[in-house]
Image: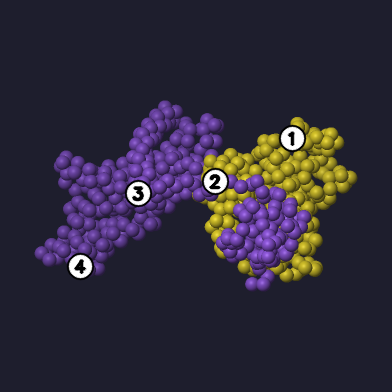
Amino acid sequence: MSSGAHFTIEQDGDSPVRLRLSGPYLVSSIGLVDRELRRIEASVAIIDLSGVTEIDTVGAWTASQLALRHDARIEGADSRALRLIKAVTFHDTDEDIEPERPSILFRVPGGVGKLVGNFGSGIVGLVSFIGEIILGFGSVIRHPGRLRVKALVHQLELVGVSALGIIGLMSFLIGIVVAQQGAVQLQQFGAEIYTINLTGRLTLRELGVLMTAIMVAGRSGSAFAAQIGTMKLTEEVDAMRTIGISPIEALVIPRILAAIIMMPLLGFYSACMGIIGGAFIADLTLDIPFFIFLSRIQEVVPLYDLYVGLVKAPVFGMIVAIAGCYQGMRVEGNSEQVGLRTTKAVVQAIFMVIVLDAFFAVFFTEIGWA
Amino acid sequence: MSEGEGQQLDAFKRYRGDFPIVVEGLVNRFGSQTVHENLSLKVRRGEIIGVVGGSGTGKSVLMRSIIGLQRPAEGHIEVFGRSITDAAPDEVLGVRNRWGVLFQGGALFSTLTVGENVAVPLKQFYPEISEELLVEIARYKVVLSGLPEDAVSKYPSELSGGMKKRAGLARALALDPELLFLDEPTAGLDPIGADKFDRLTRELKQALGLTVFLITHDLDTLYAICDRVAVLADQQVIAVGTIPELLATDHPWIQEYFNGPRGRAAQSSQARSDGGGKSVDNQPVGGA
């Protein structure tokens, strides 16, 4: 490339080695020639810049570094080049631009130690966060005027009303799957009429609430973590504190209350949609008329199945909301943390919900609500 | 297109035309609110032009229009003789590596260290630069911007507000731009820090031959380093000129701006530092 930067090395007889740079020495043109300049092994005594047509700080930097490395002097520089060289010399540092990375020998045990430490501080943080929430609820109960009704209503809408569509569709489809798959098995011994029991009891006791909790964790738990996390990054949470607004009262309690109130409603709605889905597929494939299916539900599903679902729902809602708010409040530093904490909030919420669901299943069987 | 050599941008040539920024008949509207109405401005090569105006007069919007982040409703903008308003995004790319922008908050990439932040534009435009040179460039730019050496490997969240601005400046200077946009560089800095930033801007302009488009509220900065000042009011640039020239106009806003208590303080502090022949460091800094 004739218009690019290039160089020649001149040596006649005993005269000192002259490195002649020519062409434009700019950040845009220096990339390739720089590699070659670094490979020069002959000891250069003079760096001649008289052939340089254009120069910027990168060019000046390269020239001055060359001069330093070869202990050479610079000749033929015009006033602009001299000014630039003067500006960039003495501006060297050994600091690496990447953060320090210890060797793998230290990194692995260091990582494990950090994990354990984080787990410990996470538990301490969670316990103190729950304590703060309890105190917050206490002060709201003592001074009911401090309850943020507007924020609560807004959250009720976000958590509940706007989730109706997706949860309804999901439950309807799950009802279809449960009824259809159950019917295939039950048909083998002519008991397809029990599809009604299966669908009704399963959706009311387990699936309605569990699937709703998972959906709410994905929709609202993640939103809680991301919203609060972003507010922490932009110092909005700190600003609240300085004005005397407790972030727990303003941000966390409305969200937790909204989740606790909405989960039973959504869970019940989900179970209903599941049953409708089951009735729909039973009408189509099992010759059980739609309304017969629905009236049979009343007879074969004990009332306590509904109670089981309704008792679990607010607990799940609380767990999803606490996980979201807690992770949001833990965001510190940069935007990457928001994503990380949001993921954690959802994963922890779903995991905790499923673990608790197992405990509930054993508990309700033990007390005779089988 | 503007006259002369501005026609074709040669990648290895500096811009030789007289007016790197030309704004003509700019109109910007947000909904029913008109920010700019038939605004025109020409920035000369090699000058530091200060842009002042009350809050909400569209200083930042003007800058965003020039660098192509805000599509104006009407009007024509040329940078280095190349149209920003009519060009396809790909064409603007040839201009983008010739300017550096310092946003108000620094706008550093929060997941990268300061050094890596500086390396981003270099990698983006010149992938052929070797890793060695990249690291060297990032280092000297950071130090050139007045940051301590150990700042290179720090994350933006570990820096103070003033250091973030300097780190932002280092990134803006990464490509050795010919044109530098600074959006309120000294806002939020302590007087000593602001003073240092001013001197740094002036030194960089002299050493690198930069053209600087500087939005500021800081009267000391205007007096200390700006060659000309453009005043934004009534949706237009109502006056451009040196400060004495502006003082000679009788627009009420300009009079109030420069002859208010803060304006006078900055003026007298400038007069003292000029007349006394002392270095600016020893002077108590007024205003701000």
Same-subunit check for callouts 3 and 2? yes
Marks 3, 2: nearer the viewer: 2
Please give the letter of the chain rendered in yellow.
Answer: B
Please give the letter of the chain rendered in purple.
Answer: A
User: In the image, which disc is placed on residue A287?
Assistant: 4
Q: Which residue is mark 2?
A: A95
Instruction: Identify the amino acid type marked 1.
Output: Asp
Q: Give how far apart the Cα atoms at labels 2 and 4 are.
A: 78 Å
Is B40 in front, or is A146? B40
Instruction: Identify the amino acid type marked 4.
Output: Asp
Residue A32 drawn above or below residue B216? below
Q: Which residue is mark 1?
A: B281
Can residue B32 be seen from the camera position used here?
no
Instruction: Identify the amino acid type marked 3.
Output: Val
Marks 1, 2: nearer the viewer: 2
Marks 4, 1: nearer the viewer: 1
Q: Residues within 10 Å of mark 3 (few under 14, many from 20)?
A: some
Disc 3 and disc 2 in contact, CB within 8 angstroms:
no
- The figure's colour scheme reads by chain
Quadrant of the snapshot with the N terminus of chain A: bottom right
